[in-house]
Amino acid sequence: MLRPAQLQDFDLQSYFGLPAVAKKLQGLRCDKCGWETIDAATLYAVGDALAGLLLESPERMAPQVLRFMRMRLDLTQQELAKKMGLSRKTINEWETKGRISPQNDLLLRTLVYTHLAESFRPRLGVLDHVRMAAPKKLAPVIVSVPRIDRAASVFG
Ligand SMILES: [Zn+2]
């Protein structure tokens, strides 16, 4: 049975395609097999917290980061292309090869920043606990994305 628990190192790679671990996250743990998961609202908040941290990095965004940012905006490649006045091919090239221009990097950051300002969920307090980890340090743990209907049933 899944019970509320504080998860020490929750691997976010399978959710976001990035080498990231959430520390001390409120989640759920199976008291039989130890399987850990988080509900949909927490997953969403963690994603936004991770995006906020990535926005602070001065590095030009890498392909997997560009893809992650588009997913935070909940846009398809076509939709993001239209919003930025670019072709879908250009967006696809960012997400496969990188090479986003400094101008477009800044424009995309602005779009994500605006999105975060609108959707920020302070109640979960996860901002202090999400850190990027080097890929080699990640535990090889695969977690399944929790289905929203199950999360809803757990929390009534
Ligand atoms: Zn179990």
Image (tube, rainbow, N blue to C red):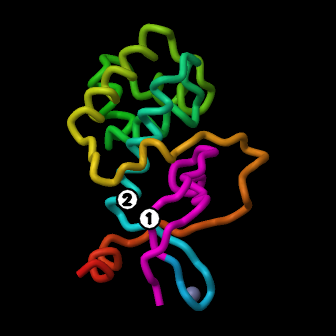
Q: Quadrant of residue 52?
A: top left
Image-based side of 96 in relation to 150, left or right = right
Q: In which quarter of the image is residue 147?
A: bottom left
Q: Residue at x 37, y 41 (%)?
A: 72
Q: Is residue 155 positioned above or below 61 on the image?
A: below
Q: Which residue is drawn at 57% across and 60% down?
A: 10
Q: Is residue 104 positioned above or below 64 on the image?
A: above
Q: Is ligand 1 within 8 Å of the beta carbon of the residue shown at mark 2? A: no
Q: Which of 122 and 108 is in front in this view?
A: 122
Residue on which disc 2 sits: 42
Image-based side of 71 in relation to 129, left or right = left
Q: Three-letter amino acid code at disc 1?
A: Gln
Q: Quadrant of ligand 1?
A: bottom right
Q: Where is residue 97 in the image (x, y as percent from the top left)?
A: 62, 26
Which residue range is magenta in the image? 1-28
* Label 2 with label 1: CB-CB less than 8 Å: yes
Helix, strand or loop status at disc 2: helix
Q: Where is residue 60 in the image (x, y as percent from the top left)?
A: 56, 18
Q: Is ligand 1 within 8 Å of the beta carbon of the residue shown at mark 1? A: no
Q: Position of residue 154 (x, y in %)?
A: 32, 81
Main SS of residues in magenta: strand
| Magenta span contains residue 5 | yes
Q: Which of 16 and 23 is in front in this view?
A: 23
Which residue sits furthest top?
103
Residue on which disc 1 sits: 26
Image-based side of 5 in relation to 77, left or right = right
